[in-house]
Every structure is written in structure tokens, then in C-alpha cells.
Amino acid sequence: MKNLIFILSFLLPSVSLSQTNFTHSELIEIVHNKRWESDIKIFIYGNCDSLSKKTINETVSHFNSLMETIQIKLVDNKEESNTIIYLLTDSEYQKLFPYCDHTNNLGATYTKKSLKNDNLIIEGDIHIDTYFSEKEIQLTIKHEMFHLLGFHHHKNESSSIIKHAGNFTQKDDEMIKYLYSKDFEF
């Protein structure tokens, strides 16, 4: 018994360091075979208070610390961006985009893929409904920015920001690191 405990205590640290919370095939299902391969340049449009700006900046810093292949940065004008975060109420958003209806949604993310490469995300739009409470808005910003990286809702999302976990989980971080590692292949 002592030998077994010794072996387990010796092996356990290396197993937990290399273990992931998902398989390659699960990740492919979650991202629908898409990711960014160029830097994400975000322009913020609308009613961005200091708390929302802080949440966006912290999320960008967090993501950048995990990704090897791309970086995210905020830009000062729409023309430089490939992604826009709209911080507007539903009615304000519908004035800009009358064909969109996400009434009663906290937020929504749209990504556009390349016509030349199905695996490549080239643009994104995020709408955060500013009608809701500060807490809900901050959580929704993190949730929608995770979608922006290519992550969709999935069946095992209970341990993820996708399930409104409050913050990014170890599984979220591992998926970001893996998807945006130099060695990743679809």
C-alpha cells in the first residue's frame, strides 16, 4: 500500500500538469473548426462606462497572456478594427441594425469567416445590452468575448464562462491556450 501511495504521489503532479479538461475532438466541436489567425483589433462603440472598459481591458490582457499566435488590442477608430463591441440597449442596437432582434438577450456575438478558408475568423461584432445591471453586463462582456475567440455553447459547459461561471475557468484557459498555440492543427 505504501508503494502504491508513493507511486501515485510521484505521478500525480505530472499527470495533473499535462492533463486537460477536454479532448481535441471536443474542442473542434466547440469551435466549429474556426479560429482567428490575425490579431483582433477591437473598437468600442456606445455607452462604455469605466467598469465596462476595465472588464474589457482585463479580458483582453487575460486572453493575450494565454495565446501564442495572435494578440488582441483596442483601437481608437472603427476603420482600424476588425471587431466592434456595441454597448447599447436593444432599442439603440436595433436602430443601427433593424434586421437583428435579440430582445431580452444580455448579449450576442457574430463572427465572420473567410470565404477562402473555412477555418479562419476574420471579423466579429459583439452586442452587450446596457439595459441590465452592472454585474450582468460585466459577466456578459467576458462571456461574449470568449465567443469572439470562436468558442460556442457546448454540452459540457457547466465548468465554463459559457455557462456564466462568473469568471474564466481552468478549462476555458486550457482551451484558449490549446486553440491558439503554435502547434494547433484542425
Image (tube, rainbow, N blue to C red):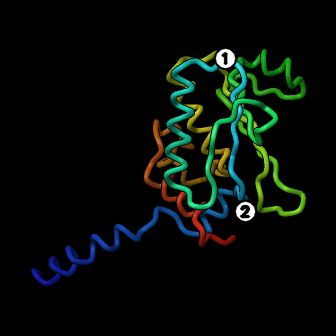
Quadrant showing the N terminus = bottom left
Rendering coords of residue 61 (x, y %): 51, 43
Relative vertical location of residue 79 with respect to residue 118 in this rendering, above or below: above
Q: Is residue 119 found left or right of 158 in the rendered image?
A: right
Disc nearer the start of the sequence (2/1): 2
Compared with 146, 183 (above or below) is below
The reply to whether residue 8 is visible in this rendering is yes
Left or right side of 24 for 65: left
Q: Which residue lies furthest to the bottom in this view?
A: 3
Height in image: 34 above or below 47?
A: below
Quarter occupied by residue 120: bottom right
Q: Mark 1 points at which residue?
A: 47
Between 91 and 122, the one lying in front of the other is: 122
- Element at badge 1? loop
Q: Can you tell which quarter of the image residue 69 is in?
A: bottom right
Residue at 85% x, 56% y is 114
At 81% from the left edge and 26% from the top edge, which residue is drawn? 101
Is 100 on the left-hand or right-hand side of 172?
right
Identify the secondary structure beneath mark 2.
Answer: loop
